Amino acid sequence: MLPSINLGGTHVSTFIIVMIVAYGVAFLWGVRRGVDAGLDRQDVFDGVIIGCITAVFGAKLGHLVFESAGHRLPDGSVSTGMVDLLRADPWHWARIEDPGYVWYGGALAMVPVALWFTRSRGLDRYVVADAGAPLLGFVVGFGRLGCFLGGCCYGVPTDVPWGITFPAASGAGPHAVHPTQLYESAFGFALLAFLHWYEPRRKVRGELLAIGAVGYAAARFTIEFWRGDAERGVHAGWGTSQIVSVPVFLIALGVWAWLRKNAPRVNA
């Protein structure tokens, strides 16, 4: 755990540094992939900027909606819900330098924005989906390293040899826990490698993103069984992200099946 780095006498959140690097790489790579796919450079540039902003604030709002209960307040107490959090910290949702992000919040917020943007610019959504899909694996893989360094999103206590003990400040407790951040990070990079391998072998246009969403939802649902942090939200024994993963998995699987029957063939 390395919650902050001393840069010239100023302690900067390691999570934020990782986020900046992740979004910076995603921006540059996204522009490159979009242009290489034949999209207009200005459209790609605008779309990636809008996508990054949407993802950041969507993730912050997702935290506010789904994970307010359990969030540690400025006075050291623990929030009981959204109203409690906003009463104590009204601008929590707007301070991007503070902890409190929900990956699904950012991803789901991008869906309507992407549909609007591609329609307004007359862009081929199949091309856009394929161009952006590998970024999914990279952001998950690299971003979760920030969670690990920051000490959030940790797992339940375990006696497995690879269990990790976090400092008391993380809230994980004195016992070794599952490094669920690293589990998800490893999956993200594995997904990135698979999508990179599958891209030249895909059958129809647009299916890369659907495949990525199916894989991520399944992995996230599974990994959540080992999560132990209070902020993730638990409802009837299931974490918030598990509940969200079920419809995401089913919808993405349905979209993939539809694409295989109706989308243009890659070599057509």
Image (cartoon, rainbow, N blue to C red):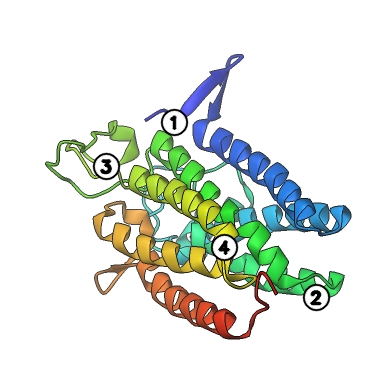
The picture places residue 212, in percent across and down from the top left corner, at 50, 63
Callout 4 crowding tier (Cα within 10 Å): few <14, some 14–19, many ≥20: some
Tell me which label, 3 or 4, sits earlier in the chain.
4
Badge nearest the viewer, 3 or 4: 4
Q: Amino acid at mark 3?
A: Ala
Q: Going from the N terminus, do you reach mark 1 or mark 2 first?
A: 1
Q: Position of residue 198 (x, y in %)?
A: 52, 58
Q: Is residue 40 visible?
A: yes
* Sequence-first disc among 1 and 4: 1
Asked if residue 83 can be seen in this view, the reply is no
- Where disc 1 sits, the SS reads loop
Q: CA distance from mark 1 to mark 4?
A: 25 Å
Q: Which residue is mark 2?
A: 119
Q: Which residue is mark 3?
A: 172
Q: Amino acid at mark 1?
A: Pro
For marks 2 and 4, the one nearer the N-term is 4
Label total for image: 4
- For residue 186, above or below residue 37: above
Distance (Cα) linking label 1 and label 2 = 41 Å
Q: Which residue is mark 1?
A: 3
Q: Are marks 1 and 4 in contact (CB under 8 Å)?
A: no
Secondary-structure class at tag 4:
helix
The residue under label 2 is which amino acid type?
Answer: Arg
Choose top left, top right, bottom left or bottom right for residue 107: bottom right
Q: Amino acid at mark 4?
A: Ala
> In the rendering, which numbered label is found on residue 107?
4
Front one among 171 and 225: 225
34 with respect to 12 (left or right): right
Lower position in the chain sequence, tag 3 or tag 2: 2
